[in-house]
Image: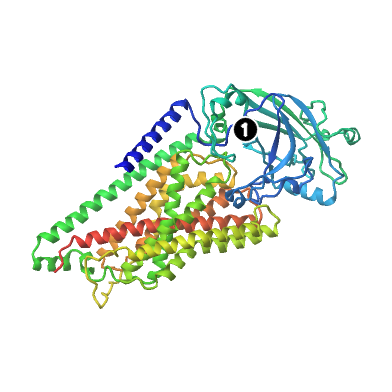
Amino acid sequence: MARPLISRRKLCATFVYLAVIFQTCIGFYLPGSYMHTYSTGDEIYAKVNSLTSIETELPFSYYSLPYCKPKGGIKKSAENLGELLMGDQIDNSPYRFRMNVNESVYLCTSAPLSEQDVKLLKQRTRDLYQVNMILDNLPTMRFTNQNGVKIQWTGYPIGYTPPPPNSKDDYIINHLKFRVLIHEYEGAGVEIIGTGEEGMGVISEADKKKASGYEIVGFEVVPCSVKYDPEKMAKLHIYDNTTSVSCPQELDKSQIIREQEKVSFTYEVEFVKSDIRWPSRWDAYLKMEGSRVHWFSILNSLMVIFFLAGIVFVIFLRTVRRDLTRYEELDKEAQAQMNEELSGWKLVVGDVFREPSNSTLLCVMVADGVQITGMAVVTIVFAALGFMSPASRGMLLTGMILLYLFLGIIAGYVGVRMWRTIKGSSEGWRSLSWSIACFFPGIVFVILTVLNFILWGSKSTGALPISLYFIVLSLWFCISVPLTLLGGLLGTRAEPITYPVRTNQIPREIPERKYPSWLLVLGAGTLPFGTLFIELFFILSSIWLGRFYYVFGFLLIVLLLLVIVCAEVSVVLTYMHLCVEDWMWWWKAFYASGSVALYVFLYSINYLVFDLQSLSGPVSAILYLGYSLIIAIAIMLSTGTIGFLISFYFVHYLFSSVKID
């Protein structure tokens, strides 16, 4: 009795401790990095990420261009796996900010521009490359007016090309007007929990006085091109004060990019007090363009899909229930007559569970589909709950990879158990488990390696270094493969699914059809695509146009709808094939819902041609198509698995409900 009493006391003490913690936390903020507060005059240094462009999708290092370098040399910030895979390269910069001190500062004057410097600057300018600067984990934001509409962008351009007749010349951005929004924080009544780059931490009562100060809640920039007198600027040193300048409108007062030009870099800082609180500072970045259209489109899709799915579901239930009721109420002679006259699905009772062709491949694809679906569901649920903050760069991709690795145990279990059900024995489960562990990752590895050689040839920071290859391979073979083998071992010990009917030795001949069955399978993918394509537009825009995507609540709803529609479409198509005495339903059930991937890939090509017209060059197009192919294969495996598993259990239930002599 002593041990249970002690454990109860520990449990009660734990609950009391948690209650005290929650009571003291008047308010809390989960997503994002740990809050920093600064006193007046505190120095804060901005960081710079890779240069990016919506025209090429090839990221390059900030210091690949002749920019000013920090005093202590270039130092890379710690990056997680997701950041490395996305091509992020975050370095320190010489841009210094002193809290609540407005100033105009000189940085440096470059050496005379060489022919290579001019060529590179002109190329990056014409390819619309952006500088991505970060202050206190906030990316810089700028505003432009297009046709009277105020549009916000992250980052600022390297330079600009004026309209004709001066379009032969390019001008570099060398003066930045920063506007830093700050909020005065007094450290009372709010407990902050951070889960970002700096780890998790809580501001205690003792630290409240220390925490008092200013929070950075906004980071805006106005880029300018200003021509300075190089002899006058050469007399200045880094961080010397200069006179404030206004952005010139005349081209002769702007800094042209040409050989032997010396470029002087300066910047101004203005601190502005704001009512925005620290937990809400990301709201400005997460406001999506065309939000009303987004809401209307999603709600419209939901209504249409619910309507169609409801009709299919009601008709289907009535048809199957009527068939089963009539079949079971008749005597044997009437049953035989009914089989000949009315229905075909009951005639394939001796063949419906016959082993399909390429059964090993089917088991592998279904197992990998379970792994991908589990990864997607868990990731989107956590993102919808706010755990995947945009402040934690790369965390979404890192979380997806780790989830995929650990879900290998479920993939191994499902694949081997399905293998036992089809084959009737566990022989060969090890090789099957290895195939499961290597099939989808192997495809991704091959595509990424080809793309990586292209990135290496372009000297892009998006190219994965050799060290990262070894890290990814180590994770693959040290976590995913052993867990998949363990799942396979558990699958051999689980009870195989028993078929409700016996399979005949001689297969039944399938009647000829007026139209090929693959046509129906391809057509079935249009309904799941209807639930997906509107959200797909916003996702593609966020990936390729550099916009933030953070409406994971919508994405979760779309995912649930997609699962329902995939299941219904696959079941209906399976039933239709059985009704025409086609007992080879296994692969058709998989591709009925999996064919949505074909439409996703075709839509990606359509997006490339019509919506992503800024993308230029064969290298960029190959990268785009390569990544789109990976996404399409993952969607095929996931949706195909959903459709197949539901169809399998439907067929199992259908034939177990029929009386067989």
274 lies above or below 610: above
109 lies above or below 524: above
* Image quarter of residue 227: top right
Dot 1 amino acid type: Asn
Q: Residues within 10 Å of mark 1 (few under 14, many from 20)?
A: few
Q: Nearer the viewer, residue 353 or 406?
A: 406
In x, y percent, where is residue 444? 54, 60
**Image point 48% across, 63% down: which residue?**
481
In x, y percent, where is residue 79? 62, 47
- Name the quarter where the C terminus is drawn: bottom left
Question: Going by the picture, which residue comes out furthest to the front?
Answer: 2
* Image quarter of residue 646: bottom left
Left or right: residue 260 versus residue 413 is right
483 lies above or below 545: below
What is the number of callouts on the image? 1
- Name the quarter where the N terminus is drawn: top left
Left or right: residue 190 versus residue 575 is right
In x, y percent, where is residue 251? 80, 35
Q: Is residue 151 visible?
A: yes
**Image point 84% across, 51% down: which residue?**
115
Left or right: residue 106 versus residue 402 is right
In x, y percent, where is residue 432? 42, 69
Question: Going by the picture, which residue comes out furthest to the right?
Answer: 231
Q: Nearer the viewer, residue 138 or 119?
A: 138
* Image quarter of residue 33: top right
**Image point 44% across, 39% down: which residue?**
553
The residue beneath circle 1 is 147
Left or right: residue 342 versus residue 621 is left
